[in-house]
Amino acid sequence: MPSIPEGQVAEIVFRLEGKEVSFSYKLESFPWETEGVGATTTLEKIMKLREYIAALSSEWELIQIYTPDPKEQHIHVLFRKRNGNADTV
């Protein structure tokens, strides 16, 4: 799968036993403050990230939180759009 530019939605479609299944993914970037700016402890950063994620639309589900480099100011999070189809994997 090619990389997804931040904020863009990538749709993946494949066939499974003759049935077409599609998934939509998006990559978001959230502030991951460094020392001296906003949250300073790891726990404070995690709590702030939880707030950002909770504020997102419920049509997106959390798939992965990427580990930021120690000096990063943003953390990347991958989401998949919920499609309401119980047959999807």
Image (spheres, rainbow, N blue to C red):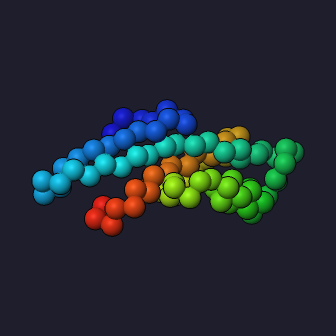
Report the side of 54 relative to 60 (left or right): right
Q: Is residue 33 above or below residue 88?
A: above
Q: Is residue 34 above or below residue 65?
A: above
Q: Residue furthest bottom?
A: 86
Q: Is residue 65 above or below residue 33?
A: below
Report the side of 36 relative to 20 (left or right): right
The quadrant of the image that shows the N terminus is top left
Report the side of 44 relative to 53 (left or right): right
Q: Residue furthest front?
A: 84
Residue at 71% x, 47% y is: 32
Residue at 56% x, 58% y is: 58
Image position, residue 77 (x, y; %): 56, 49
Q: Nearer the viewer, residue 62 or 43?
A: 62
Residue at 26% x, 52% y is: 21
Name the image quarter holding residue 33: top right
Image position, residue 7 (x, y; %): 55, 37
Q: Nearer the viewer, residue 45 or 88?
A: 88
Q: Nearer the viewer, residue 25 or 65?
A: 25
Name the image quarter holding residue 41: bottom right
